Amino acid sequence: MAYGEFPDLDDAIARSTADAWEKVKGRVTPLEWALHAPLIAEINALKKQRDAVILAHNYMTPDIFHGVGDFVGDSLALAKEAARSEARVIVQAGVHFMAETSKILSPDKTVLIPDPLAGCSLAASITGADVRLIKQRYPGLPVVTYVNTTADVKAETDICCTSANAVQVVEWAAREWGVDRVILIPDEYLARNVAAQTDVKIIAWQGRCEVHERFDAADIAEMRQAYPGAEILAHPECPEEVLNAADFAGSTAAMADYVETRRPQQVVLITECSMAANVAGDVEGVEFIGPCNLCPHMKRITLTNIRDCLLNMQFEVTVPEDMAERARQAVQRMVDLPPPPVPARYDLVRARGHSVQVELI
């Protein structure tokens, strides 16, 4: 770090945060960093004192993602890393259902969330009671539940999935149960996009992510016109019209891998805003272009409340053991499946000519 950029910053703090600054300086101003760096140094010291690790989701701001995150990535990958870690304390820099998943997979560890009000519109769209009613309406059909759900919903399901492996999990469930219909909840758009890639009929819930549902095909058309050479990547929680207009669609992990592997000159990530800023810190020579939408729930997590969370050991997340055990079985079934045979992606060629069979509950 060029200390001249931060004349009022303590040298020890400047040195300890130098690597993070190199990754974020294209997205964070020196004035902002002068405020962030002392907090980052304090948090990293507190982690050692508390025997803690921080799980930073892809939608965290760059100061959190690159400054204090010990493990970074999507929600399930973070929970699995937490389970493997020997740390006694887990701080979830993400939303509440992610902290619950971490607790489910790490029942003997203390799981903290910096802001207990950091929720999720998709997770809030369905409850365990809703799932029980769905199972009464469709007896004998397997229930596949997206990991972006609360513990009580996972506890009522047969197997979980991610946006990366949803097609694989749906087809596995159809084979295991010997049926041609599978219940896939709660994201309506993910369900429709899965239905475009399989012959399994999908029964879907009308839940949506408030970040991704705001995108439409007009956003893609505007980007094509303004930046004809840009490659456009979309998340499967977007409407089908968006995915059909994109060049590639996949989970946050798949999008990051796409950019790191292909290194396009210009790229548009149709997802939460911080995703582009964080991937940009790990790649060079790629220009990231909007549009994007902010998640108000993810943005409740800040360096200040992460520091306070560790300092006061506050806002512990717990899951009743009977609920956690049933939810753990659903997650473990998914984890035990072999990885998809090809990199996680949305098969646009097949989807555009495929009959989509979705029944909305």
Image (tube, rainbow, N blue to C red):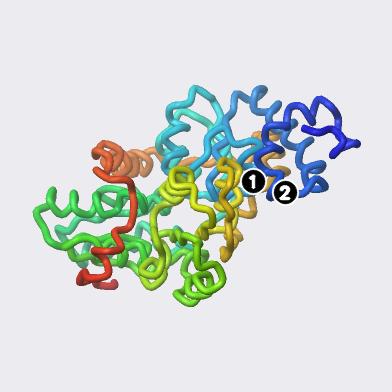
Amino acid marked by disc 2: Val
Asked whether, in this view, residue 221 is left or right of residue 14, the answer is: left
How many marks the image carries: the answer is 2
Q: Residue at x 90, y 36 (%)?
A: 7
**Quarter of image, res 69:** top right
Q: Secondary structure at mark 2?
A: loop
Q: Nearer the viewer, residue 227 or 187?
A: 227
Residue 197, image x, y percentages = 24, 61
Q: Residues within 10 Å of mark 2 (few under 14, many from 20)?
A: some
Q: Which residue is mark 1?
A: 62
- Give the answer, above or below, for where 220 lies relative to 265: below
Q: Nearer the viewer, residue 185 or 75?
A: 75
- Give the answer, above or below, for where 17 lies relative to 219: above
Q: Residue at x 54, y 25 (%)?
A: 88
Q: Nearer the viewer, residue 252 or 232?
A: 232
- Give the answer, above or below, for where 99 lies relative to 120: above
Q: Secondary structure at mark 1?
A: helix
Residue 175 appearing in the image: yes
Q: Residues within 10 Å of mark 1 (few under 14, many from 20)?
A: many
Of pointers 2 and 1, the one earlier in the residue sequence: 2
Residue 239, image x, y percentages = 40, 70
Q: Which residue is mark 2?
A: 28
Residue 298, disc: none
Gap in angstroms between the C-alphas marked 2 and 1: 8 Å
Labels 2 & 1 near each other (Cβ < 8 A)? yes
Residue 309 appearing in the image: no
